[in-house]
Amino acid sequence: MAGRESLLRLCPLLLPQNRDGTAYEGFVSAQGRDFHIRILLPTDSQLKNARIECSWHLKKILHGYRHVLKQRLHSCPDLVSFVVELKTVLEIALKNTQELRVPWPPEYYSCLVRDLETLGWNKVVYVDTGLTTIKLKAEDSRDRQHLITLKLNAKYPAEPPDCVVDLPVQFAISWMPQDSLVAVHNQFLVALESLKEFWDTMDEIDGKTWVLEPENPTRCATSRRIAIGSNVSVSVEVDPRHPKMLPECYFLGADHVVNPLRTKLNNNMHLWDPEVGLLQNLKDLLEIDFPSRAELEKIDFTRDCGICYSYRLNGTTPDQVCDEPRCGQPFHQACLYEVK
């Protein structure tokens, strides 16, 4: 009886349907709304064997939480405890669903469509069904394609959109309430032009050398691991604001191979010429020619790890090399730790 009274206080609209207390039907309230539900308990009152029936509307809201509710049925000691958990899950589900989203003002939509027409639909790549997320494309002066994703809120254009870009530097827009998507797009173009030399540099590296990492570099990637020879490479970190300056260099390979390269870099550092491209400067300072993409294949520089017999392990490549000149076998650092 005490359990029924507790349940009545918790959910006054959820009532027992029989004397045995094995069937309850009514409404569960959350976020100021009532949802129809029916709970059927087995004769032994074991919650884990209970059956929950509800309206299609509530079923839709709780769709992604079915496994959670099933766990609660198994762990809760009684029906009251389960209903408490059910109300908590329902509150969370309602906050994370668009069921309660208040329709945005008509002025928002009319303003947004007008801005898109002014900008030009040819620059629009994607618009979601709610007209809240938009992807725009832009080309820099080298005909490289770039995307900017805009996430708008109901107060647009009084408040600026959030911008997601694939740039190696921070992108922050200046915004006035009278601004539009055209202003964002124009500022994006300015940012692209400011990074033109950086991408020219990275494209030259990608086009004229064998890049071991990253495997598929994005426009925001500032590092490249460049093959120098078998099991020997240099990782460069390029400053996107000053791409023609001497980058940070980290050599990977056996000591008897990379030590002479470090010495050459240190001794010839004064020869670095900002008027010359980064790749040519590295050749001059290290007194080497990087392996040609036309004459060699990437497989010539990608020997498998001597422990796990694979090249890529959890996204990493072998970065440790045996110092024995007659060996030169590469290993993943993680694999070396495991066998120690």
Image (spheres, rainbow, N blue to C red):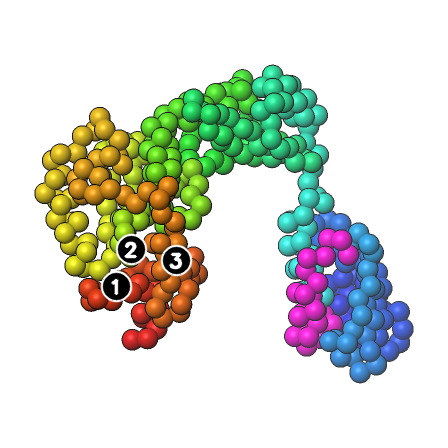
The secondary element bearing badge 1 is classed as loop
Residue found 82% across the figure and 54% down from its top:
56
Question: Which residue in the structure is indicated by mark 3?
Answer: 316
Q: Is residue 325 above or below residue 288?
A: below
The reply to whether discs 1 and 2 touch (Cβ–Cβ < 8 Å) is yes
Taking the image as shown, residue 72 lies to the left or right of residue 199, namely: right
Closer to viewer: mark 3 or mark 2: 2
The secondary element bearing badge 2 is classed as loop
**Mark 3, other Cα within 10 Å: few <14 / some 14–19 / many ≥20:** few
For marks 3 and 2 on the same chain, the one whose residue lies earlier in the sequence: 2
Residue type, numbered disc 3: Thr
| Residue bounds of the magenta highlight | 59-81
Residue type, numbered disc 2: Ser
The secondary element bearing badge 3 is classed as loop
Taking the image as shown, residue 180 lies to the left or right of residue 45, namely: left
Which quadrant would residue 284 be assigned to in this image? top left
Residue type, numbered disc 1: Gly
Question: Which residue in the structure is indicated by mark 2?
Answer: 230
The reply to whether discs 3 and 2 touch (Cβ–Cβ < 8 Å) is no
**Mostly what secondary structure, the magenta segment?**
helix
